[in-house]
Image (spheres, rainbow, N blue to C red):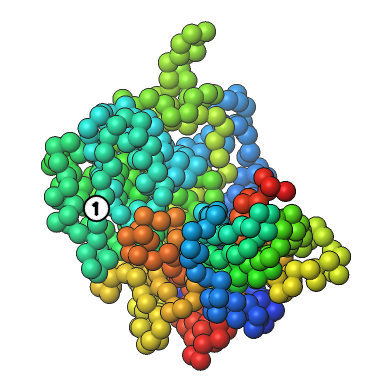
Amino acid sequence: MDLNSIYTELIMEHNTSGHNEKQLENPDHSERGHNPSCGDDLTLQFKFDGDIIKDAAFIGHGCAISKASTSMMIDLIKGKTKKEAYDLVELFIGMIKKEITDEREFEKLKDAFILQNISNMPARVKCAVLAWHALGESIKEDV
Amino acid sequence: MKSFNIEKIRKDFPILNQDVNDNTFVYLDSAATTQKPISVLDSIEKYNKSSNANIHRGAYALSIRATEMYDSARKKVKDFINAPYVESIIFTKNTTEALNLVAFSYALENVSRGDEILVLISEHHSNILPWQMVARKNNAKLKYIYLNDDYTIDMKDFKSKVTENTKIVTVAHISNVLGTINPIKEIIDYAHEKGAITIIDGAQAAPHTQVDIKKLNPDFYVFSGHKMLGPMGIGVLYGRRELLEKMSPFLSGGDMIEYVEEQSSTFAELPHKFEAGTQNVEAAVGLKRAIEYLEDVGLENIKKHEMKLTEYALKKMKEIPYITIYGTEDIDKRSSVISFNIDDVHPHDVATILDSYGIAIRAGHHCAQPLMKYLKINSTCRASFYIYNTLEEVDIFIEGLKNVRKWLGYGS
């Protein structure tokens, strides 16, 4: 196992920068993502403008991978419609599960593409997908 | 005392002799499950190749042989823990099932509205959830005993919380997170004095220390085979015979019956009343061989060896400034489990980084979320040593720890 391919600079940057790790004022919706087996517990918060995800942030605690993955996801979905965000959730989870293999598609995931390596680490997959599942839960009714 | 030969022991555990992630494998997660010596693996294979049949059911040689092997495993367990009667030894799937058996078959029928169940805050979920269930269903109260600053049980708090309403006191013999050896003899005696029954979770104790049921005198004592060199899928419930006799069966079905009519049934004698359906005979056979292995090496030797490793590891870990250890510093009050955290690094990241060096530790809440909340932490890393670990492996572990923070971008 090559740790360099997991603890990349980009993951470390998202893990420590904290630019998406904050409490939103009066969020329109909160969604708790929880891995009961490991205790990671992150809450996503959203502000919507109609169908657009105007702002998002997260609070809680998690490992470097889950926090970085959450932060990358938030950067990616801000300003997108719920449908666009939901498609990205499906693309990301498809990538991690190795169900989608068209590498060109993954460019749409921007920074989160780097988490592709996690699919080779079954023990950490649940860390990477935690926030994405929570996002999917938050918007699935509207798409 | 018998001699302890680590080189010989290492050879008995072929799984340890491999590379993981291009490094020598270092297994430091025996508190989760232990590895099996060749003799245990061979005993299971031999059973399956020569004696496998359903027990108590066949009027033929193999079934009789399998039954005898199963009974002989029960006798071995009885002797191992110095229990008074072989009928008091019930085979279960694991510690969790044993505790659930007590909750469903004893507690639901003997705990009433307003009664109290007393649990130690450091308990594993298996020794919390069944009592939450009993408290919820019977309108009883679940009360927690808390800890001293040194992570040991606060005996004053314990004594102040045992009241005339206390029906059950349940604690682990040894904590799976903190490694604390709880003073169970004192706890059992005090609970009995106040009229409560006692349940001891021995999952982390039976593999490491001599358990003497006659001396300790608990009402129930439970443990698992897979944490003591035996197979998964077999656990042990020791119960005081007069209590077991009065209790209703936990699971109903084949082999636990006496007579079955259309509308009613009577049940078999102990221990069969609590062993419904086809049993895990091969695991019982493996458990017997595991106990023989432990006895051959000697529990005193095992304890001495693993505490030598623990003391050494604690000393080395304390020299690293960014490590916090959760557990008593009193070596006489602890076992070979070390829970710790590294500043600014989540335990899962610690485990992944150590894994890349071939080192297996546990990270997370260790199925003890109430304890984590009580300690105001989310999770810890846990290294646990056993019979087959070496000082060299502790050194590899310590070197691994020193590298963790660098991977996460910290200077040291």
Q: Is residue A93 visible?
A: no
User: Percent from the top left, x then y, of residue B353?
Assistant: 58, 77
Above or below for B217 versus A109: above
Q: Which residue appears at 48% of the width and 51% of the height?
A: B225
Q: Which residue appears at 47% of the width and 31% of the height?
A: B275
Q: Can you identify the residue that label 1 sits on?
A: B145
Residue A102 left/right relative to B267: right
Above or below for B411 versus A108: below
Of the pair B56 and B33, the residue shown nearer to us: B33
State the residue lying farthest toward the bottom: B411
Query: For the N terminus of chain A, which image quadrant?
Result: bottom right
User: Percent from the top left, x then y, of residue B87?
Assistant: 37, 33
Q: Which residue appears at 55% of the width and 76% of the height?
A: A19
Report the amino acid beneath label 1. Ile
Residue A56 lies in what quarter of the image?
A: bottom right
Of the pair B361 and A101, the residue shown nearer to us: A101
Q: Which residue appears at 40% of the width and 86% of the height?
A: B320
Q: Is residue B124 visible?
A: yes
Q: How many neighbours does mark 1 have within 10 angstroms: few (below 14), some (14-19), or many (20 or more)?
A: many
Q: Chain of mark 1?
A: B
Of the pair A113 and A79, the residue shown nearer to us: A79
Q: Secondary structure at mark 1?
A: strand
